[in-house]
Image: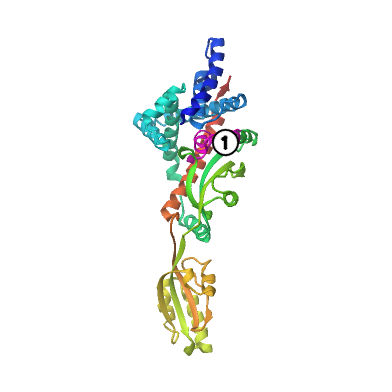
Amino acid sequence: MKRSLTAFLALVMTTFGGAAHAQQVEGIAALVNDYPITTVDVRNRMRLIIVSSGIQPTEEALLRIQQEALRSLIEETLQIQAALEYEVEVEPAEIDAAIANIAVQNNADPSQIASELAASGVDIATLRRQLEAEIAWQIIVSGVYNNRIRISNQHIEQTLERVAASAAQPQYRIAEIFIEIPLSADDSVAQQRAVAVMTQLSQGAAFQAVAQQFSDAPSAANGGDIGWLLEGQMRPEVAQIARILEPGQLSRPFRVPGGLMIIALIDRRESSATVQYELVQATLPSSRLTDETRSSFASAIDRVRSCDGIDAALEPVEGAFASRLGQISLDALLPEIADRLRALGPGENTGVLDTSAGQQVYFVCDRAIGGPGVPTPDEIERQLRNQQLSMFARRWLRDLQRDATIEIR
């Protein structure tokens, strides 16, 4: 939060203050299942959005901020109502911890956050309500859906395969703003929100702060920052855009499944990730090559189902033997062997190769990726689980909105 934004708040407070003074009355902005959202609530949320994101409160911006404030208050009211139904209560200490995290992200302490909000005419209770809804929603979504999510080893392996395929390519540190398009709606509202976000970013608003207030992705809590990624970890649409951005550049809104995405490329670095193979080499020496041994060797290779069975399979083949090469990277192998291995996974082999040593086969017993920014299988599982939780959360919130009685006045 920046003190220079106080001047912007003066315009907002004058705009709202003058209108409220003329009317001498506050009213109801919306009813959500008979729970009132007041014009005071909307105005306070608008102030919070402006002071935390650095948006310039022009006349056009104020209208969009008002729409965003009301939208978020309606969603939060539904989330809090769901928490009450599930008897989930957020402790004040949990909200205090969330505020402390915001302070760390802004190189401040919690008392500074409260002071700067107060100086800008924002009651700290407005921020606490927003955080209470976020925390409660995370708790009930995790409680309802966490046990329903099954991340298979095959899914993890498929993701690791994509990561392995891009291990030698650059890594990207990306921040995102995701704007959801509900399944039952056209994209006009999302397009309008995306235009509003791009307008504020073009006017100098901080990406991190805008993401915190406007993004529908779980990464909003971190200012949109999703850390370092290999191309294999990104959606194809995101990877395509990331490749053409330079560090510090911002994309235009683009379509991804479920909505619109805006990304900022924070940094790019050359990958130092390496793919390490655990290999067993089966060899039929040149001195033992005959039509009979060639046929026996090929049949033995076909019988191998795992690295543990190689020695037994080769035993009937006169002169054939297996060598365990241990962990080895592709660049340590001859190009023709490396090319065969590149697309193989554990349990697969190169097939019989004619080499200067005779006939050889390389079996992949394991394959691992190492280096900075390379995720472990556990990290990939958490990433996949969080993606599914996010999808369930959005669907549930849409269902709550569909089933609710919402009256906007």
Of residues 36 and 59, the one drawn nearer to the viewer in this rendering: 59
The x, y position of residue 270, in whole percent, is: 50, 57
The x, y position of residue 125, in whole percent, is: 42, 24
Please give the name of the residue rendered at 35% of the width and 29% of the height, measured from the top-left corner.
Answer: 92
At label 1, which amino acid type do we have? Leu
Please give the name of the residue rendered at 57% of the width and 36% of the height, measured from the top-left corner.
Answer: 201
10 Å neighbourhood of mark 1: few (<14), some, or many (≥20)? some
Residue 204 among magenta residues: yes
* Vertical relation: 154 (above or below) 310: above
Chain part drawn in magenta: 196-219
- Residue at the disc numbered 1: 201
Residue at the extreme left: 93
* Visual colour scheme: rainbow
Of residues 340 and 314, the one drawn nearer to the viewer in this rendering: 340
Q: Is residue 56 left or right of residue 96?
A: right
The x, y position of residue 343, in whole percent, is: 53, 66
Of residues 113 and 300, the one drawn nearer to the viewer in this rendering: 113
Placement of the C terminus among the 4 image quadrants: top right
Find numbered disc 1 in the image and state the secondary structure of the residue it sits on. Answer: helix
Please give the name of the residue rendered at 48% of the width and 41% of the height, measured from the top-left corner.
Answer: 219
Residue 198 shows in this picture: yes
The x, y position of residue 69, in whole percent, is: 53, 27
* Vertical relation: 188 (above or below) 175: above
- The picture quadrant where one finds residue 309 is bottom left
* Vertical relation: 28 (above or below) 220: above
Residue 33 shows in this picture: no
- The picture quadrant where one finds residue 116 is top left
Residue 213 among magenta residues: yes
Q: Main secondary structure of the magenta part?
A: helix
Of residues 302 and 368, the one drawn nearer to the viewer in this rendering: 368
